[in-house]
Amino acid sequence: MSANQSVDRALSILWILNGAKHATVTEIAQELEVHKSTASRLLSALERQALVVRRQDDLAYELGQGILQLAGSVNSQNDLTKSAQLLVETVAQHFKLTANVAVLDEIYAVNIAQSAPTERFFTPRQYVGRRTPGHATSSGKVLLAGAAANVREQLVHEPLERFTKWTITDRQILLDELKTVKEQGWAASNNEWDSDMTAVAVPLHSISNDVIAAVTITGFTHDLPSDAFTRQAEELTTVVQRFGRLLE
């Protein structure tokens, strides 16, 4: 039996149990049209991952707690995205700048929500769902600064791509900046990814104080000049602390 065939049959078992609520090894083998030993082996693998559980009274199998955990993760992600969209709409209108919420993916930032103020005719391009370079974006710096040490260690092995003449490509300079970001509580991207575009980001913390996302305001250099970074970062932090509970 090939690996793909095994995966397909294992997933079929989950669908069988979803419809039947519970089933014995014999019943599952008949449904899959396989030998009982094959069905038993697949069920054992699913049981080790807590995706199915064997009942003590009749030895039939039913879906396990692992399924609930997976479903809960999906719901949490959907809730996070919906809440993040509400937050960026609030931030965009407050600052009259484009706002984003991003989460960490390896050493990249992935935007899950974006909003632009209604008054703006032209805004930065749409980044929702896109991987953006952690070392060249304010959101990426915030997320990397708040990540575990082993995540930042990946920066040593990954080439730091240059996007503009201001992009940080020296690893030690980047690591030093991430240390500063963690200490001051915010990060900036000053024409480092797109020329004539600047951005400021602050972390969004969980109840346990882990960094779960970064909230960013982005604009053209004349809308968000570097001498306003500190003031805007402090104000953004206040806004996020006030409205960021939507994401908890």
Image (cartoon, helix red, strand yellow):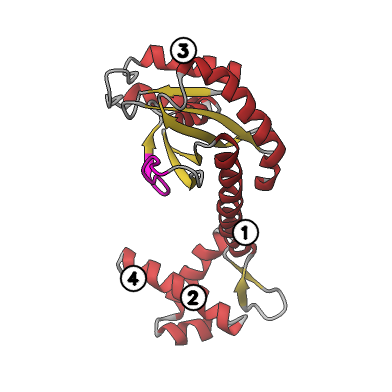
Q: CA distance from mark 4 to mark 2?
A: 12 Å
How far apart are labels 4 and 3 at the CA level?
A: 49 Å
Disc on res. 5: 4
Marks 4 and 1, how far apart in space?
Answer: 28 Å
Callout 3: helix, strand or loop?
helix
Magenta stretch encompasses residue 125: yes
- Given this view, does label 4 or label 3 mark the residue nearer the observer? 3
Q: Main secondary structure of the magenta part?
A: loop
Which label lies toward us, 3 or 2? 3
Q: Earlier in the sequence, mark 1 or mark 2?
A: 2
| Residue of label 2 | 13
Secondary structure category for the residue under label 1: helix
Mark 4, mark 1: which one is toward the viewer? 1
Circles 4 and 2: CB atoms closer than 8 Å? no
Residue 142, above or below 124: above
Q: Which residue is mark 3?
A: 176
Disc 1 versus disc 3: distance between alpha carbons? 38 Å
- Give, as a three-letter code, the residue at label 2: Ile
Query: Is 45 one of the magenta-colored residues?
Result: no
Residue 247, x across and y down, in percent: 65, 46
Do the numbered discs 1 and 3 sit on residues whose CB atoms are within 8 Å? no
Residue 105 in the image: x percent, y percent?
44, 40
The dot on residue 72 is 1
Magenta span of residues: 121-131
Point 46% across, 87% down: residue: 30
Percent across and percent down for residue 34 are: 40, 81
| Crowd band around label 2 with a 10 angstrom C-alpha radius: few (<14), some (14–19), many (20+) | many
Cβ atoms at labels 4 and 1 below 8 Å apart: no
In the rendered view, does 205 fall on the left or right side of 134? right
